[in-house]
Structure formats: structure tokens, C-alpha cells
Amino acid sequence: MDRIDVMRLFVRIVERGSFAQAARDLQVPRATATHAIQRLEADLGARLLERTTRIVRPTLDGALYHERCLRILADLDDAESIFRNAEPRGPLRVDMQGTIARFFVLPGLPEFIARYPGIALTLSEGDRMVDLITEGVDCVVRAGELSDSSLTGRRIAALKQATLASPAYLERHGIPATPDALDGHRMVAYLASATGRPYPLEFERDGRRWEVPLPYDIVVQGAEIYTASGVAGLGLFQVPRYRVEHQIAARQLVPVLEDFPPPPMPVSVLYPQSRHLPSRLRVFIDWLADRLRSAETSR
């Protein structure tokens, strides 16, 4: 391995906290990776990594070298892209909510792959906070307000939301006319992981905003079970409208309080703080933002 390859290997070992996982990511034998780092440490005259039975982490010297490697590799990638007019390439791991993947990403993915054949995309589905560095994930796509200051975020969309209920629920409780007329109604409670408390229902009109916490019979976490609870008649609930258009058309759900819509749901891409954004990640973020924007404009 030449010095640049060894730098890339070293950076990936620090990111993954594992020789084996880094070697697997870069498709080199584990023994080759071990020997390359031993040779690097010998050449530099410094111990760069601390190895335990559970994890590999950088020493103080290793942390300094890691930072320099990031800068060198970023400048090298940028330079090569300029002079070669190179297309983005390399592995790209993205974690996102399943509904965003199903409705926006997967239908357009053949077009993305045809446009960027050098990008090896891996998608995973999740709605939890991911340790991007440890888990080797390049970015996560999340809906809702975000507060993790350790990551850099780019808001790429604001999805229209609706307040909904099943026909059976509305037969029992009636159709509310305004947010001030929700006495006697119930909601499906969605638990906020940040606070451990359910979100209230939210409404907006003419610059005024309502937050209405209603009594509930069930508390949920997860987009699919949240919507399914509403279809089952367990209460009012609020979701991005794109997710339930087919259930509205099938009369499984009925929009209510349409003159008082919930605030739009922000969608953001989060990635580790760094001055350098790899071109493969940059083009994916731009492509996804266009997909979401086009879908919302067409509604």
C-alpha cells in the first residue's frame, strides 16, 4: 500500500474503531491492514493507535495525525476532481426513515445509480440517533426538529402535514371545527425521544399557533405504528400528508381541521462536522433535496 492508501486506511480504522471493519470496508486483507499501520507507526516513530479487546482508538499523536490526514485526503480528492473532472465514486452509507426511503428515494434510485455508477450506495432504515463515526455511516436523513450539535445539518425539505382520524373515530367523537373545540377528543400519542413525553397536536393559522395536548389511550414510537393506530380509530394524529394519500383515497382516513394545518415537517440530512464534504455525499444530498422538492411541488 502506498502512503495515501495507508492514510485512508488509518482514517477508516479511527472512524470504525476496528481493524477488521476498516479492512472489510476498504476490501483489503486484515493482515495487510495490520502490517501497514505497524509500518506507518515505525516510519513516524510514534504510536498512533491504542488497541484493546473491544475497540481501537487513536492516541494523542494519532488524533493529531488523523486530523492532518483528513485535510490531506480532502485536498487530494478536490484536486483530482478538478483536473480529472472525475465523477463521484466510492462507498456511501445512508441511514434514513423507512417512509422517506419508500416514497421518495427508492422510486428514483435507478435514475441516481445510472447518473452516478461509481457510487456504491448502502441504505439502512432507522429512526434512532446513529453514531455516524463508530457505525461507519456517511449521513442520516431525519424528519422533525433536530438538536444534535455534534453533527452538521442541512434542511432539505419541509413536508406538508395533515390532521387525520378514521371514519369510526369521527362517528364516535364528531368532527372538530377549530383547535379550540377539541374537548372530548383523544389523540394517538407519539413519544418524543428527546423529552420522554408525547408531542402535542399543533395547528397554525394567520400567524397564530396552537399546541393542544389531548388525552390518549396509546403511546407509540415509529411512523408505521403511529399511522396504523390512527386507522384503528384510537385518536387524532398528525403526519406528513404524502404518507397517507392512499388511505385518504380509500376512506380509511379523513383529514380534519384543514383550515388549521400543522406546521410543515422539516427533513434534514446530518453528517459529521468537517470542512470537507465528499463529492459522493454532496451529489446524493442535492439529488434527494430535488426529489423531495419536486414531490411537494406536484401535490
Image: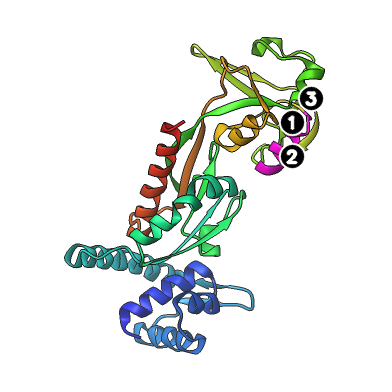
From the top left corner, tell me how far across and down residue 74 is, in percent: 30, 64
Which residue does the image show at 31% across and 84% down from the upper left?
A: 2
Label 3 sits on residue: 168
Task: Give neighbour class at mark 2: few <14, some 14-19, many 20+ (Cα, 10 Å).
Answer: some
- Residue 151 visible in rendering: no
Helix, strand or loop at label 3? It is helix
Which residue does the image show at 38% across and 84% down from the upper left?
A: 40
For the stretch drawn in magenta, what is the main secondary structure? helix
Amino acid carrying mark 3 in the image:
Ala
Which of pointers 2 and 3 lies earlier in the amino acid sequence?
3
Which residue does the image show at 80% across and 15% down from the upper left?
A: 184
Seen in the picture, residue 10 relative to 153 is either above or below; the reply is below
User: Disc 3 versus disc 1: distance between alpha carbons?
Assistant: 15 Å
Label 2 sits on residue: 220
Task: Give neighbour class at mark 3: few <14, some 14-19, many 20+ (Cα, 10 Å).
Answer: some
State yes or no: discs 2 and 1 in contact (Cβ < 8 Å). Answer: yes
- Comparing 107 with 278, the one in front is 107
Helix, strand or loop at label 2? It is strand
From the top left corner, tell me how far across and down residue 236 is, in percent: 71, 25
Checking the image for residue 188, the label placed there is: 1
